[in-house]
Image (spheres, rainbow, N blue to C red):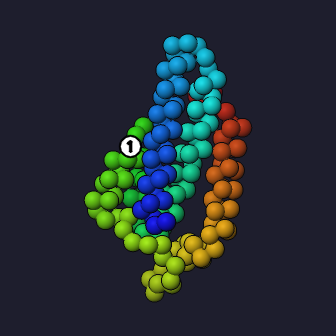
Amino acid sequence: MTPRSVYRVVSIAETITWTLLIAALIVRAASGVAIVVTIAGGIHGFVFLAYAATALLVAINQRWKPGLAICAVATAVVPFATIPFDVWLERRDQLAGDWRTIKGDDENWLQALVRWMLGHPAALIALMAVAVVGIFVVLLLAGPPGK
């Protein structure tokens, strides 16, 4: 899978979970059944974190400027914003190319770490999973927003 395809899949998943969460909020308002928001909110929260991790990984690989990486993560906060941002990135050729698995003369330590991780996909997947699950658990323990 290319950076473009990975980013796109997670971007679409993030949008789908926004739809689930908004639908759950409507169900709760109409019926008073609160558990649907708990379930949809948990799913959305997990996918949101996975999107943020993926956006950062792709940003480092594609050598985006920090502001662009921050914008990519920030789009997940606004419902459905990841899709138009994905289109914007595509139009500006920011998702083109493959994963950087060969050492470049101009790479910094973070890019070298990502290159190493891309050469060891099991370690990369495990690290991302541990990070996303760890942050998700901390946020679950902290409680829902506003409480």
Question: Residue 144, how many percent across, how many down?
Answer: 62, 31
Question: Residue 121, how many percent across, how many down?
Answer: 62, 69
> What SS does tag 1 mark?
loop
Q: What residue is at 61 percent from the left and 17 percent from the top?
A: 33
Question: Residue 109, how many percent across, how many down?
Answer: 55, 77
- Is residue 37 visible in this depiction of the protein? yes
- Comparing 138 with 10, the one in front is 10
Q: Quadrant of residue 90?
A: bottom left
Q: Does 124 appear above or below 75?
A: below
- Comparing 113 with 13, the one in front is 13
Question: Residue 103, how many percent across, how many down?
Answer: 51, 84
Q: Does 70 appear above or below 99?
A: above
Q: Residue furthest bottom?
A: 105
Q: Does 117 appear above or below 40?
A: below
Q: Amino acid at mark 1?
A: Ala
Q: Which residue is mark 1?
A: 81
Q: Residue furthest top?
A: 31
Q: Does 27 appear above or below 88?
A: above
- Is residue 63 visible in this depiction of the protein? no
Mark 1 nearby-residue class (10 Å; few <14, some 14–19, many ≥20):
some
Q: Residue furthest left?
A: 91
- Comparing 94 with 105, the one in front is 94
Q: Is residue 58 left or right of residue 145?
A: left
Q: What residue is at 52 percent from the left and 15 percent from the top?
A: 29
Quarter of the figure that contains the C terminus: top right
Q: What residue is at 48 percent from the left and 76 percent from the top?
A: 100
Report the label total. Answer: 1
Q: What residue is at 36 percent from the left and 68 percent from the top?
A: 96
